[in-house]
Image (tube, rainbow, N blue to C red):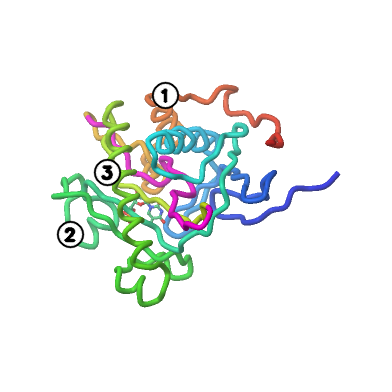
Amino acid sequence: MSRRRLVYEGKAKILYEGPEPGTLIQYFKDDATAYNAEKKAVIDGKGVLNNRISEHVMSGLNAIGVPTHFIRRLNMREQLIRACEIIPLEVVVRNVAAGSMSKRLGLEEGEQLPRPIVEFYYKDDKLGDPIVSEEHILAFNWASQQDLDDMVALALRVNDFLAGMFMGVGIRLIDFKIETGRIWDGDFQRIIVADEISPDCCRLWDTRSERKLDKDVFRRDLGDLIEAYTEVAKRLGIMPENGGKVLAGPKLVH
Ligand code: TMP
């Protein structure tokens, strides 16, 4: 029996070689980290919830023509994705002041921003993912001007989609982070949304009570993370079946 090939292991996910060239299998772990992995825990069932929530978001984005790496969910913890060349930048969109922006600029958490603000962070754990400007990105050749324009356009479309989707279920989208990658479609290079979009990489507050329904529950010890993520999944109408148990492995796609 041959073992599938591990391509990459990150803090919350593992990538395995996919069944066809140009595909990968993305496995969602239960590991939670914060503050550049200074704080760590294993939270039973987190991977299952994030797999389902990310599937829901990415399928919705694909359906409105925002390209993502998501192909389909395979089982409770895995999804089939398109392989892409990850751009080493985290793209953060903020609608409301919170987290590092509040600290950096002395803004009260919860203050509505005049318009959505897009920021870039250079993906480097050793450096703690520092914020960078377009000048840095172009000078160090991490992305081209065209890539940057595409990334901002993509991030703002994701923001509109997510803000509307969450508003419909009584959740205020404060901010979120996406990762992007390059793929080739024939002769054309395109930027697509990669990684995951889940409560691990968004700030989500209940509209009425301002209860936190995202990873800040873990970062700031605000209570039960699974309860918070389950609330998000329930409101979106996507509770995992099977009580969070792992189902059989992936099937070969033809
Ligand atoms: P920040 O306020 O800590 O900069 O985070 C902004 C948003 O981006 C927040 O929703 C959390 C998300 N984020 C990640 O998912 N991963 C990261 O490494 C960072 C820095 C932020």
Q: Residue furthest bottom?
A: 139
Q: Residue furthest left?
A: 114
**Which residue is labeled 2 in the image?**
106
Q: Residue at x 29, y 51 (%)?
A: 93
Residue 117's place in the image compared with 254, above or below, is below
**Which residue is labeled 3 in the image?**
174
* Cα separation between marks 2 and 1: 35 Å
Residue neighbourhood size for the residue with mark 1, other residues' Cα within 10 Å, grouped as few (<14), some (14–19), many (≥20): some
- Going from N to C along the chain, the mark reached first, 2 or 1, is 2
* Cα separation between marks 1 and 3: 19 Å
Q: Which residues are magenta?
A: 186-207
- Note whether ligand 1 is within 8 Å of mark 2: no
Mark 2: amino acid: Gly
Nearest to viewer (mark 3 / mark 2): 3
CB of mark 1 within 8 Å of CB of mark 3? no
Q: Residue at x 30, y 52 (%)?
A: 153
Image quarter hosting the N terminus? top right
Residue 211's place in the image compared with 187, above or below, is above
Q: Is residue 118 left or right of residue 60?
A: left
CB of mark 2 within 8 Å of CB of mark 1? no
Image quarter hosting the C terminus? top right
Nearest to viewer (mark 2 / mark 1): 1
